[in-house]
Amino acid sequence: MNYESLLSKLKKYYFNLDSILLTVIYTIGHMVIAIVCVMVITNASLELAMTDAFIEPLINGVWFFILHSAWKKFSFAK
């Protein structure tokens, strides 16, 4: 394995790790915001708010990961 190949693999790993870390932070923040919003807007119990706040951001987190990965792929390809 030559130097350029190794550097290319490390760069690809770093960019994937970057997307995952950003996605996790975004998803946790989204969950906290969703809990507060559901409790305030609907006067739901903490348990119901947490259920909603857990499921919906996980789906959004996956969507964000896909978008962020695609963004990096196409923006670095130029």
Image (cartoon, rainbow, N blue to C red):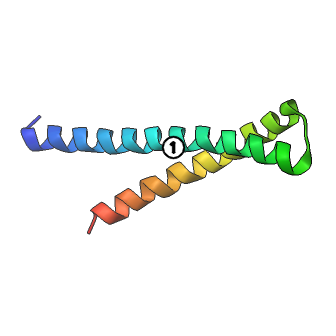
Q: Identify the residue at image location x=82%, y=38%.
A: 49
| Relative image position of residue 37 (x, y in whole percent) | 77, 48
Tell how many labels. 1
Q: Is residue 52 left or right of residue 30?
A: right
In this view, the residue farthest toward the top is: 47
Quarter of the picture holding the N terminus: top left
Q: Is residue 37 left or right of residue 33?
A: right
Q: How crowded is mark 1: few (under 14 residues within 10 Å), some or many (20 or more)?
A: many
Q: In this view, does 29 lie to the left or right of 17?
A: right
- Which corner quadrant of the image does residue 74 belong to? bottom left
Residue nearer the viewer, 33 or 73 = 33
Give the amino acid at mark 1.
Thr
Q: Identify the residue at image location x=36%, y=58%.
A: 73
- Which corner quadrant of the image does residue 12 belong to? top left
Quarter of the picture holding the C terminus: bottom left
In this view, the residue farthest toward the bottom is: 78
Q: Identify the residue at image location x=73%, y=45%.
A: 34
In this view, the residue farthest toward the left is: 2
SS of the residue under disc 1: helix
In this view, the residue farthest toward the front is: 40
The residue labelled by disc 1 is 23
- Which corner quadrant of the image does residue 8 belong to? top left
Q: Identify the residue at image location x=84%, y=42%.
A: 39
Q: Is residue 23 left or right of residue 16?
A: right
| Relative image position of residue 9 (x, y in whole percent) | 24, 40
| Relative image position of residue 45 (x, y in whole percent) | 90, 34
